[in-house]
C-alpha cells in the first residue's frame, strides 16, 4: 500500500466511525446527555413516587432547620402530584420534576431535581425550590 492509499483508508474508517457513533442519538431524536420529556406523567407510578419522595425530603430538611433555629411555625408541604417530568443521563439518572403541593389552603408548585444511582441504591434530592412563573 502506498502512503496515499493508507491515508484514504484511514479517512474512510474515521468517517464510518463518526457517522455510526452519532446515529443512535439521531434515531432517538435527542442529543446525547440532553433532557428527555416523560409522557403520561400523571399516571406514571414511579414518577409520582419520586415526586412524593422529594416533598418528604424537603419536609425532613425543613424540620431539621426549624429544630436548629428553635422555630415552632413549620409549614410542611403536602404532595399533590407531579405535573411534568424529564430525565437526563448523567452519572445515574437525573430527574427534573415540576411538583404540585398543598399547604395552609394554598396550592404551590415546586421545581425539583433528583439523581438516582441504582448501582449504589442511592437517591439524592439536589434541588427543590418554588417554580418561577415568570412570563416573557
Image: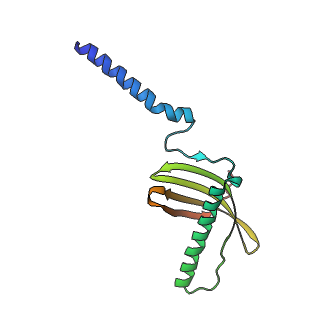
Q: Quadrant of residue 16?
A: top left
Q: Is residue 30 above or below residue 88?
A: above
Percent across and percent down for residue 15 are 39, 24
Q: Who is closer to the viewer here, 66 or 26?
A: 26
Given residues 32 and 52, the one toward you in this image is: 52
Give the residue displayed 63% in from the left and 56% down from the top. Answer: 47
Residue depicted at x 74% and y 75%: 104
Task: Give the quadrant of residue 78.
Answer: bottom right
Query: Looking at the image, which residue is at 56% across and 50% down?
Result: 87
Q: Is residue 33 above or below residue 62?
A: above
Q: Is residue 131 visible?
A: no
> Residue at 65% of width from left, 83% of height from top?
73
Q: Residue furthest right?
A: 105
Number of numbered discs on residues: 0
Q: Is residue 118 visible?
A: yes
Colour style of the rendered protein structure: rainbow
List x then y, in percent, for residue 67.
55, 84
Q: Nearer the viewer, residue 103 or 47?
A: 47
Q: Is residue 4 left or right of residue 44?
A: left
In the rendered image, the quadrant that contains the N terminus is top left
Coordinates of residue 85 in the picture (x, y in percent): 63, 52
The answer to whether 72 is drawn above or below residue 135 in the figure is below
Q: Closest to the observer: 36 or 118?
A: 118
Amino acid at each position: 500500500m502506498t502512503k496515499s492509499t493508507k491515508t484514504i483508508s484511514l479517512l474512510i474508517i474515521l468517517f464510518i466511525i463518526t457517522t455510526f457513533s452519532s446515529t443512535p442519538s439521531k434515531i432517538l431524536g435527542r442529543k446525547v446527555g440532553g433532557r428527555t420529556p416523560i409522557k403520561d406523567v400523571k399516571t406514571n407510578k414511579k414518577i409520582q413516587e419520586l415526586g412524593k419522595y422529594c416533598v418528604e425530603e424537603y419536609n425532613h430538611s425543613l424540620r431539621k432547620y426549624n429544630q436548629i433555629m428553635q422555630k415552632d411555625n413549620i409549614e410542611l408541604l403536602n404532595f399533590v402530584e407531579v405535573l411534568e417530568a424529564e430525565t437526563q443521563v448523567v452519572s445515574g439518572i437525573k430527574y427534573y420534576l415540576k411538583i404540585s403541593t398543598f399547604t395552609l389552603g394554598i396550592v404551590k408548585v415546586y421545581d425539583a431535581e433528583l439523581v438516582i444511582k441504582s448501582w449504589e441504591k442511592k437517591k439524592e434530592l439536589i434541588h427543590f425550590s418554588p417554580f418561577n412563573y415568570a412570563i416573557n
